[in-house]
Image: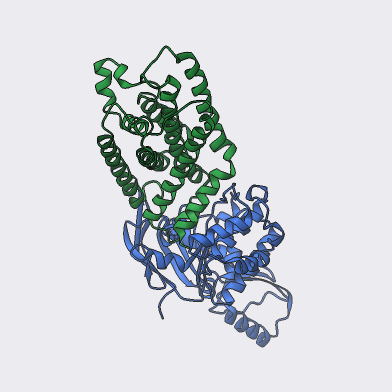
Amino acid sequence: MSGFAMLLYKELLRFWRVAFQTVAAPVLTALLYLVVFGQTLEGRVRVYDEASYSAFLLPGLVMMSVLQNAFANSSSSLIQSKITGNVIFLLLPPISYLEFFAAYLLASMARGLVVGLAVLGVSTPLVALPLAAPLWALAFALLGSAILGAMGVIAGIWADKFDQLAAFQNFVIMPLTFLSGVFYSIHSLPAFWQELSHLNPFFYMIDGFRYGFFGRSDFAPAASLAVVGASFVVLSAAALLLLRSGYKLRG
Amino acid sequence: MMPAIEICNVAKRYGALQALAGISLDITPGEFFGLLGPNGAGKTTLISIIAGLARADAGSVRIMGADVVTDYRRARRLLGVVPQELVFDPFFSVRETLRFQSGYFGLRRNDDWIDEILQHLDLSAKAGTNMRALSGGMKRRVLVAQALVHKPPVIVLDEPTAGVDVELRQGLWQFIRRLNRAGHTIVLTTHYLEEAEQLCSRIAMLKAGCIVALDSTRNLLARFSGMQLKLRLDRAALPEDPGVTVLAADGERFTLRLRDYAALESLLHRLRELGVQIQEFELAPPDLEEVFLRLTGNAPAAAEPRT
């Protein structure tokens, strides 16, 4: 077994050991959103003629959970290791920066996808949801979780304190998620905000993921996939460059 | 013979601070080597560069021929490091911690060796205990165990006995000595000068990023220190001797500095020739602390509160 495999296993175990906090809690949060927004806005907001508002909302919430938890996993693991100092145990063995990145990335994706699947599983009895193009949904879930996992690696390396990480989460991740069309179709927005939404990579993740369920979206799914794929390449490259330089990890 | 650690012109700067000013040093396989110096002398920086935890601005380090940057995989397999800080992963037990560390080095089934280390470090009873529940001394022992999971031929210990009680310190040294006898090269930084004196066969003293002394422990002690001898004779008649310096004389009482043990023999011989009888005799052996003081011009850190 390589150092990479052990690091991946350790990272998976790390969140699974505290699954109540890392999986059950975000599932409950997503369910609360679904029940509260679904109930209050049902009938007032009609995005698709053939689907209820709750059905429209659910894929957005699933993807939001995937993204937030993928980010939370790598970023919080890294900053905890840095602050407690035990990151040294990963820096002493012969683990390459590529293996290091891949292990954190895959563990983040796993947590994001597990939470997303759980949200979907728990809500299925409550909401009738079609599944028009599951492979598209899967592709966007994988790429979306990978992007946020990579962002988490970057934020975890950069942040020296928990509040810096919280700032990143509150001022970057949350606004980008909420303004991405989780709760509404961007077609319902004024032209200016629609244009602005097109600059938000999260929009393409949510929109593309939703295509997998309804077979329709605000933006062509192939084009969204290209945007999302490019975002992943750019962020991974940035994370790898940071790791290779030893920034904040190898003095 | 290929050095266990070959340090070649290593320099490192942190902003305005020149932490290491071009250090060169070869550590021989099988040595028990001491790295001494006051706080901020550059000991931990040097160890970080050896371990790949920091990058040198200039120069190179090789572990048994493997460059720590260009051939880092091989270099890191050959090196075990016990860090100074008492760090641990609170999510896992002692055994899990050691299994993970084995896995990071690519070792899958390592439980036989893990059991052996646990036994030697008196940790067998704590194998299933979560790291959080261990005392400081036990956490320190787990750090030593973690450094040994991959059976490295070269072991570096950065202040391993800081904050460890006397009993545990003895046990730890016994274990490290045994590793050394089994052929492991040991490099140790310490504040405890008597520790270095007892354990290390060779010592480098660092000050402000430079090596100010590098010699066998015995030579260092002989060259820089000398013994102090207190004598009371039956009359005030002290013969002159080139190896003896009189520090104080009060009637038939003398405080002397002896250059080495040969000077002691020569002095005793002359006293016998003169028929002078010794009434009281007190010999203080050479003291590394004094060497340290003279070379670094600093009070030894052992006198300071330890963190």
At x 44% / y 36%, what residue is drawn?
A66
Viewer-nearest residue: A52 or B12 = A52
Question: For the view shown, which residue lies furthest in the front direction?
Answer: A50
Residue B297 shows up from this direction: no
Is B293 situated left or right of A102 in this image? right
Q: Colour of chain A?
A: green
Q: Position of residue B165 (x, y in %)?
A: 68, 56
Question: For the view shown, which residue lies furthest in the top direction?
Answer: A44
Res. B47 image quadrant: bottom left
Q: Is residue A200 above or below residue B90?
A: above
Q: Position of residue B186 (x, y in %)?
A: 52, 69
At x 64% / y 86%, what residue is drawn?
B269
Viewer-nearest residue: A235 or B69 = A235
Res. B128 image quadrant: bottom right
Res. B289 image quadrant: bottom right
Q: Position of residue A85 (x, y in %)?
A: 51, 48
Viewer-nearest residue: A230 or A169 = A230
Q: Position of residue A195 (x, y in %)?
A: 24, 22
At x 57% / y 60%, what residue is drawn?
B99
Viewer-nearest residue: B161 or B101 = B101
Which chain wears blue?
A: B
At x 47% / y 27%, what residue is drawn?
A128
Is A198 situated left or right of A23 in this image? left
Q: Is residue B260 above or below residue A91?
A: below
- Across the whole image, how many numbered discs are drawn on residues? 0
Q: Is residue B204 above or below residue A226?
A: below
